[in-house]
Image (spheres, rainbow, N blue to C red):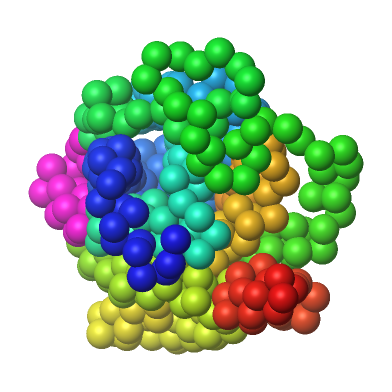
C-alpha cells in the first residue's frame, strides 16, 4: 500500500471512525476537568502542592501496572473486549470522583479511572496498529491523538466556564457522563481486529487474512529479550515518559497552580490549556505524515525545542497574551513528538507481541505520570514553581539527545531505499 492511499485505507474501515468518536467523547470529559481539578483539590481539601500533583498525576500511574496486562489481554481476549471494559471502568471512576467527599476517596477513584483509561489507550494503539501498515502506521496511530486533541481543544474552555459559573464540581459529573457515552459507541460500532492464528477454527464472520506482522500468532524465540534490550526501546520509552511527565506534572498540575498564584482566573487557565491542544492538532497531523515519509526521529529536536521555549515563557510571563503564546508553543511541540514515538514502538514489536509491546510503551507513560506528580510537585513545594518547570525542561532535553544520538531509524525514505537495494 502506497502512502498516498492512506485516505482510501481509512475510508474502508468504519470501525476506526466509531473508535475516534468514542475517544473524542471521553477526551472531552477529561479536557473539561483539566483546568478545574487542581483548583478543586486545593480548595476542597486544603492539601499541599505535592498532594495536588498526586491527585492529578495518579490518574496515569495505573499505566505502570495495567498497560502490560492490558496488552496481553488484547492478544488473548481481543481488542474489543479490552476497549469496552476499559471505558466502563473509566466511567465508573469518573462518577465516583465527582461525588468525592475526602482526599483519599478522590485519589483512590482517580486511580481506578486511570486504570480504565490505560486499558482503553493500550487497546486503541493495538487496534490502529492492526489496521495499518508500516508505510502509513504513524498516520493511523495519530488518529488516536487527533481525536483527543479535537476534544481537548474545546473541553478546557467549557470546563473553565462551568467552573466559574456552576462550581468546580460540575465538570467532574459531566466527565463521567461523557465516558459512558464513549463506552456505548464502542459497544455498537467497533469490531474485533485481533489476527486469528493460522490453522485455528475461526469464529463466524472472521477471515484468515492477516492484519499485519505477527498475524500467524507465532512469536520468534528470544523475542522478549531482544525487545527489552533494544536501546531504542529504552530511550524512546524514556522520551515518551518525559513527554507525559511534562503534560501531567507540568501543564496539568504545576502550571494551573502557578497561574493561579500569578493571578489568572480558572477561565483564563482553561483557555491556556485549550490553546495547547489547538496547534497540537495540526502538528500531530503533520508529524504522522513526516514520520511515515522521512523517519520517526525527524521531529524530535524541533518538538523538544518548542516545548522548552513554552515552559520558559510560562515561567517569565505575567500577561494573558504571554500565557496564550506559551500554550501555543507547548502544543506545537507535543504534537510533533507524539505519533512518531508510538509508531516506533509499533515498528519494533516482534510478531505475536504487538499487544505486549504497545502495553510496555504505555507503561513508560505511566511512569511519566508518577514522575510528573511526585518530582515536579515536590520540587514546587521545596524550591518553587519556576524550579519545578525548569527541571522538567532539562530532563526532557536530556532524553531527546539520547534518542537522537543512539536510536536507529525504523521508517522513512532511507529505510525503504535500503530495503529496495537489498532486494536486487
Quarter holding the N terminus is: bottom left
Quarter holding the C terminus is: bottom right
> Residue 201 placed where, x, y %?
56, 13
| Residue 397 visible, this angle | no
| Quadrant in which residue 273 is drawn | bottom left
User: Is residue 167 covered in magenta?
Assistant: yes
Q: Magenta residues?
A: 154-175
Q: Residue at x 55, y 19 (%)?
A: 77
Q: Residue at x 75, y 64 (%)?
A: 232
Q: Residue at x 53, y 38 (%)?
A: 210
Q: In screen coordinates, is 394 left or right of 181?
A: right
> Residue 90 placed where, x, y %?
40, 29
- Rendered position, 222 above or below 198: below
- Rendered position, 249 above or below 414: above
- Rendered position, 339 above or below 82: below
> Residue 144 placed where, x, y %?
39, 51
Viewer-nearest residue: 1 or 366? 1
Q: Main secondary structure of the magenta part?
A: helix
Amino acid at each position: 500500500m502506497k502512502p498516498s492511499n492512506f485516505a482510501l485505507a481509512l475510508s474502508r474501515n468504519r470501525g476506526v471512525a466509531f473508535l475516534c468518536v468514542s475517544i473524542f467523547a471521553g477526551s472531552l470529559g477529561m479536557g473539561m476537568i483539566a483546568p478545574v481539578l487542581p483548583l478543586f483539590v486545593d480548595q476542597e481539601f486544603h492539601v499541599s502542592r505535592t498532594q495536588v500533583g498526586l491527585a492529578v498525576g495518579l490518574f496515569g500511574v495505573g499505566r505502570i501496572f495495567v498497560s502490560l496486562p492490558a496488552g496481553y489481554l488484547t492478544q488473548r481476549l481481543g481488542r474489543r473486549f479490552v476497549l469496552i471494559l476499559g471505558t466502563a471502568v473509566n466511567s465508573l471512576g469518573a462518577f465516583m470522583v465527582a461525588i468525592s467527599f475526602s482526599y483519599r476517596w478522590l485519589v483512590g477513584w482517580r486511580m481506578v479511572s486511570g486504570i480504565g483509561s490505560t486499558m482503553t489507550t493500550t487497546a486503541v494503539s493495538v487496534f490502529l496498529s492492526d489496521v495499518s501498515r508500516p508505510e502509513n502506521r504513524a498516520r493511523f496511530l495519530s488518529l488516536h491523538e487527533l481525536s483527543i486533541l479535537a476534544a481537548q481543544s474545546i473541553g478546557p474552555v467549557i470546563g473553565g466556564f462551568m467552573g466559574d459559573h456552576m462550581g468546580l464540581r460540575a465538570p467532574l459529573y459531566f466527565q463521567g457522563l461523557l465516558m459512558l457515552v464513549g463506552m456505548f459507541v464502542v459497544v455498537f460500532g467497533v469490531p474485533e481486529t485481533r489476527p486469528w492464528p493460522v490453522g485455528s477454527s475461526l469464529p463466524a464472520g472472521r477471515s484468515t487474512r492477516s492484519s499485519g506482522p505477527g498475524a500467524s500468532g507465532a512469536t520468534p524465540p528470544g523475542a522478549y529479550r531482544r525487545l527489552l534490550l533494544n536501546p531504542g526501546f529504552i530511550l524512546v520509552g524514556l522520551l515518551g515518559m518525559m513527554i507525559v511527565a511534562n503534560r501531567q506534572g507540568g501543564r496539568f498540575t504545576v502550571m494551573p497552580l502557578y497561574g493561579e498564584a500569578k493571578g489568572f482566573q480558572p477561565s483564563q487557565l482553561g483557555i491556556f490549556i485549550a490553546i495547547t491542544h489547538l496547534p497540537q492538532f495540526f502538528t500531530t497531523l503533520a508529524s504522522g505524515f513526516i514520520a511515515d515519509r522521512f523517519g520517526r526521529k525527524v521531529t524530535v529536536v524541533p518538538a523538544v525545542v518548542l516545548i522548552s521555549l513554552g515552559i520558559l515563557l510560562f515561567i517569565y510571563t505575567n500577561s494573558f497574551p504571554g500565557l496564550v503564546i506559551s500554550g501555543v508553543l507547548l502544543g506545537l511541540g507535543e504534537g510533533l513528538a507524539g505519533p512518531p514515538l508510538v509508531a516506533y514502538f509499533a515498528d519494533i514489536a516482534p510478531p505475536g507481541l504487538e499487544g505486549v509491546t504497545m502495553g510496555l510503551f504505555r507503561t513508560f507513560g505511566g511512569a511519566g505520570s508518577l514522575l510528573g506528580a511526585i518530582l515536579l510537585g515536590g520540587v514546587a513545594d521545596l524550591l518553587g514553581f519556576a524550579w519545578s518547570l525548569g527541571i522538567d525542561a532539562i530532563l526532557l532535553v536530556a532524553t531527546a539527545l539520547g534518542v537522537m544520538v543512539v536510536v536507529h531509524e525504523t521508517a522513512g525514505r532511507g529505510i525503504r531505499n535500503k530495503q529496495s537495494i537489498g532486494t536486487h
